[in-house]
Amino acid sequence: MKRIAFLLLFFNFQFSIFNLASAQRFDIDLRDSLKLHDYYVSVPVEDGNYRVSVTMGDKRRAGVTTVMAESRRLFVENEATRKGEIKTVSFLVNKRTPRISDRQSVRIKERERSKLNWDDLLTIEVTGPSQAVSHITIERDTIAPTVFLCGNSTVVDQDDEPWASWGQMITRWFTDSVCFCNMAESGETASTFIGVGRLAKALSMMKSGDYIIVEFGHNDQKQKQPGSGAYYNFATALKTFVDEARQRGATPIFVTPTQRRMFDNEGRIRETHADYPEAMEWVAQRENVLLIDLHQMTRVLFETMGVEPSKKAFVHYPAGTFPGQTKAFADNTHFNPYGAYQIAKCVVEGLLAHRVPFTRYLRPEYPRGYSPLKPDPFDKFLWTPSRHVDLVKPDGN
């Protein structure tokens, strides 16, 4: 149903397409859509990275606009324009399909077939309290470095409210000089990620100067088949990520798994990941890989919030909060937009601590010095939800 809605809107817009050598350029006039509260714009493009330039503002009124792309990757957040003010914001979006070659494709899950991340269209979502977008330009980019994100449900682009992950929030803080490609999927382990072709897809698009960020452990610890274990199957899979990336001139970065919201009687986070974080640290040290200890950072974050207040970072909502929701949500693994936003900042701080080169492309408004000891106040977080809600918990726990 989503695709039908997108295509109907798409064909109602006035647009022009220019063939520029190996690139495509779309100019989309949205002035007649200023009266709409929110909408989607979709264009058919080949796999790759695209620079999206969004012109905001209206001569007749002030506006506050949020722009996301594909499966709710956040790029423009509550951008205010005064009456008569016009401004343009640009960012890079990665678009892909499951196809790797004539003989190989990613074996995506059945539910992913309706996800915007895996179709033939590059989709832009325009929303906000009073959105004011008059024009969008889309053109191919083949130069900027790509950051490939590999992980599970704590990293994946979650399509629907109220779910969210840090991989779809981190894009908000970077300019159009770097592009994020989020290959993560709910329920994946390091080895299954490789087995279904997700790593192969990333490698098929990877070039020298790119990066690959790897976060696993949540689901890996539950594997019980012969050969499984933190220092066996898991460590071997992690080394595969490292070797394959370096062979292509890319830089691997490890991120230890986020904590679950599991407290003991003294208000301290209980360890639920066995020795998987330590195994990731061991491989990182042995292979000289940069490591961001998100496991420790989220421990500090949730303990700082406290037992009850930390629910505000997770999908904890009473029945009736969302249309058709007959049972309360009480998920202690998966984040809501506020929680994902905080964890994305933790990851950025980890990148800054290691002086990773692409952090020079952080937007000037990024609040340097964020600390999990001082999370953003929940009541100051302004989020305009997407129109689509999913009452089914993502895979993984």
Image (spheres, rainbow, N blue to C red):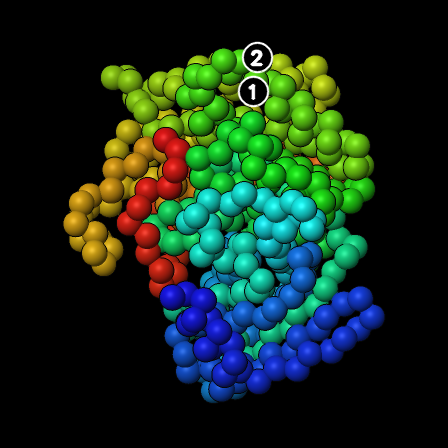
Q: Residue at x 45, y 77 (%)?
A: 8
Q: Determine whether, in the image, residue 112 is placed left or right of residue 322.
A: right
Dot 1 crowding, Cα within 10 Å, few <14, some 14–19, many 20+: many
Quarter of the image that includes the C terminus? top left
Residue 213 is situated, as x and y percent measured from the top left of the image, at: 63, 36
Residue 207 is situated, as x and y percent measured from the top left of the image, at: 78, 44
Helix, strand or loop for disc 1: helix
Q: Nearer the viewer, residue 270 or 219?
A: 219
Q: Which residue is mark 2?
A: 231
- The reply to whether the C-beta atoms of the residues labelled 1 and 2 are less than 8 Å apart is yes
Q: Nearer the viewer, residue 38 or 390?
A: 390
Q: Determine whether, in the image, residue 278 is placed left or right of residue 1.
A: right
* Vertical side of 144 occupied by 9: above or below: below
Q: Nearer the viewer, residue 123 or 318?
A: 123
Q: CA distance from mark 1 to mark 2?
A: 6 Å
Q: Nearer the viewer, residue 258 or 264?
A: 258
Taking the view exactly as shown, the residue that stands out farthest to the right is 21
- Any mark on residue 234, and which? 1
Residue 307 is situated, as x and y percent measured from the top left of the image, at: 28, 29
Q: Residue at x 69, y 49 (%)?
A: 101
Q: Determine whether, in the image, residue 243 is placed left or right of residue 306.
A: right
* Vertical side of 361 occupied by 282: above or below: above
**Type of amino acid under label 1:** Phe
Quarter of the image that includes the N terminus? bottom left
Quarter of the figure with residue 211: top right
Q: Residue at x 60, y 39 (%)?
A: 197
**Type of amino acid under label 2:** Tyr
Taking the view exactly as shown, the residue that stands out farthest to the front is 103
Dot 2 crowding, Cα within 10 Å, few <14, some 14–19, many 20+: some
* Vertical side of 215 occupied by 24: above or below: below
